[in-house]
Structure formats: C-alpha cells, structure tokens
Amino acid sequence: MANPLKGEVFKLYKNLLYLGREYPKGAAYFRERLKSAFMKNKDVTDPEQIQKLVARGDFVIKELEALYFLRKYRAIKKRYYDPEK
Amino acid sequence: MNLTTQSAASQPIKVESVGFGWPLIGCAGRWLPSGASTGFTLKCFRRVPRVKVNVSSTMSGRVLVGVKRVIDYAVKIRVKPDNSGVVTDGVKHSMNPFCEIAVEEAVKLKEKKFIKEVVAVSCGPQQSQETIRTALAMGADRGIHVEVTGKEYENIGPLQISKIMAALAKKEDAQLVILGKQAIDDDCNQTGQMTAALLDWPQGTFASELTLEGDKIKVVREIDGGLETIKINMPAVVTADLRLNTPRYATLPNIMKAKKKKIANMKPADLGVDLTSRRRGRYRGRRSARREEGTVY
C-alpha cells in the first residue's frame, strides 16, 4: 500500500466528501455513490491510470462547484430580480 | 460516477484574440476532446486588462468587507409559533450571498494588486466567526469579529451595524468598504448607505462593475431600467449587486489554510459604539408568508 499517490487519492476523497455535504439529493446519497466509485477502482495499481482517475475526480470537483454556484445564483435571481416568472 | 447533472459547460465559449492573432478559447479548455493536440498551450486563459498597478502611497490599500451570517438560502424558513420571528436554532447558516460577492470583489482587487489587504468584518454571536472563516478561505487576509450577543443581537439593525462599520473603517484606516447590497434575511438594503452617510464618504450602491482608477473608482450601478456609471473619490463605500462577479467556492484545503489566519475579537464598546435601538415594536412574522415569493413585509 505504499503507493506514492495514496495521499493524493485521500485528498481527493476528502475534498469530494466535503463538497457532497451540499449535494441537492442529500449528503448520504452522494457519499454512497462516491464510495462505490472509489471502491470500483480500488485494484488499480498503475500510476498513470491512477493519475487519470484523480484528474477525473478533479473535474467532478469543478463541475460540483459550478453546479452549486449556479443553483445559488438562480435561486437569488428568482427571488430578487424577476418576480413575475 | 454520474454526479454531474447540470454544469457550467453550457455557457457560451468565449473567443478572445490575443496579440499574435490566434483566436484562443477562454477558460478551462475542457470542450476540446481529451488528448487533442493543438500545437500551443491551452491553459486557464483569461485576459486581465493591462492596467498600471497603482496603489497610491497616501492610501492604506486596505479594504473592509462586511460579511453577515444568515440562514442558508436553500433552507425552508419556519416562523415561530408565537409569530415573534423565525426559527434559527439548529438551522443551517451560511454567508449572505451578496456578502460573498463583496468578498470576491475585494479578493479580486487584491489579486490585481490594486489593494494590499482585505479585512473581513462580521458582527454577531460566536458563530459569526465561521462566516469570517469562510471569507478568509475565499482569500481575505484577516478578520474582525465584533461580538454582539443575546438581547443586543436580537435588536441589532442596519443603523447599529453601519455605526460599527464606520468606526472600524476609521480605526483601520480603510480605503474602501465593500458590502453586500442587502442580506437575504431582513432584506434591509440600508447598511451600505448608512455607513457612507456616517463616514461622509461617497457611495457606489448596487455595483455591477468596479474599476479602480488611481484615487477614483468607476462604479457601474444597476438602476431601474438600465445601468448608471459614476466616478467617485476614494475612500468610498461600495455595495455589491448580484452581477458584480461570480464568487469562488471556499474549498476544503483553503478552509484548512484559513484556520491559521487571525481573527481579532472586539466588543462594540471598544469602538465607542452605542447599540441602543430606537426601533419601536417587534418584528412580526406571518406564518403564511413564503420566502420563495420574495415577500417583503
């Protein structure tokens, strides 16, 4: 288990777990999916492959941040800027 | 892992041209198929207008940002059975969205080196420190927590807050005060205006664009039916509207880093501010009122 990328994978998991606390379908739902996604790749040992998966995780982080921002922006816009709609 | 139901990827692709005539694709470049070879580096590419970095020597280069801890925007508001207010115990709180925009703008100004320091201020009980931490995680340099608790906190209004902000702006020798235009809990939309009045500084309210030009600020304001551009002298008070910018997300690593930043703790009395409220009567909630409708009452 002395893979040099272990720390990076841990960090990714923690970051995603933190982000998942605000997930629209609930933190529990997100955590379940997150865990299964990580467990699916638990046997991957090739560093290049791991790096690719970590990059994919970073992409998901970006998407989640965008999702949260848009959700908040839309809610505020709806409340304060176009009351008719 | 199909977690991404909606994304920002639907935003229009910005094509900007740079000096040597290549049309480059802005932002992350993730619309390109992976592994596409382009011959030149495609990176996070956003052009920052080339402006002279100009922190005037007579100015402190310090920006004060007010952040308010409010009930989270996504929480369904419940009115207390006796109509005396809304239920706040055990309810998720977060930073007021307009304050987030204000923090983001201050941090952006700092990144462009127009200013030197961003100070986040919050007034309220102990938990307000969490809100300050969020501001610090977004990039503010240090925090000031003005502790107001119990009865005083219940009766605090925009006037009291603006007195505190004005006193702090003087004490910290701030060059600029950036606030959110209003909070999503009381919807007062008064703090910025009152702060400017108490300090006798110019104000740029409802800012949707902010440019620093030497000792002056150009503010594009959102007004009914259009935009208004004004130029005001510094020091000034600016309040942020929704379209000013897109606040960044306070990520976990940044929150961890923000724990090392300092938050000064003080009482309103230390600033010589009297918090007596002259407001008569009490806030009366209506059980039928729904926040979704943007009800103002």
Image (tube, coloured by chain):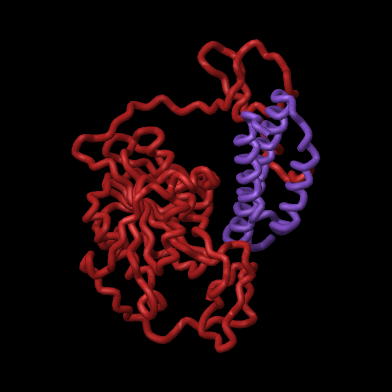
Chain colours: A purple, B red
Task: From this view, report whether residue A30 is shown above or below residue B267.
Answer: above
Measured as percent of width and height from the top left, residue A34 is found at 73, 47
Which residue shows up at 62% across the image and 46% down it? A14
Measured as percent of width and height from the top left, residue B288 is found at 64, 81
Which residue shows up at 44% across the image and 56% down it? B180
Horizontal side of A76 relative to B263 (left or right) equals: right
Task: From this view, report whether residue B194 is shown above or below residue B170.
Answer: below
Which residue shows up at 32% across the image and 38% down it? B115
Horizontal side of A76 relative to B110 (left or right) equals: right
For the residue pair B163 and B297, the one nearer the viewer reads as: B163
Whether residue B206 appears in this view of the structure is no
The quadrant where residue B146 appears? bottom left
Picture quarter with the N terminus of chain B: top right
Q: Residue at the front extreme?
A: A1
Measured as percent of width and height from the top left, residue B138 is found at 47, 46
Q: Residue at the bottom extreme?
A: B82
Measured as percent of width and height from the top left, residue B213 is found at 32, 35
Horizontal side of B286 relative to B206 (left or right) equals: right
The quadrant where residue A43 appears? top right
**How many numbered marks does the figure carry?**
0
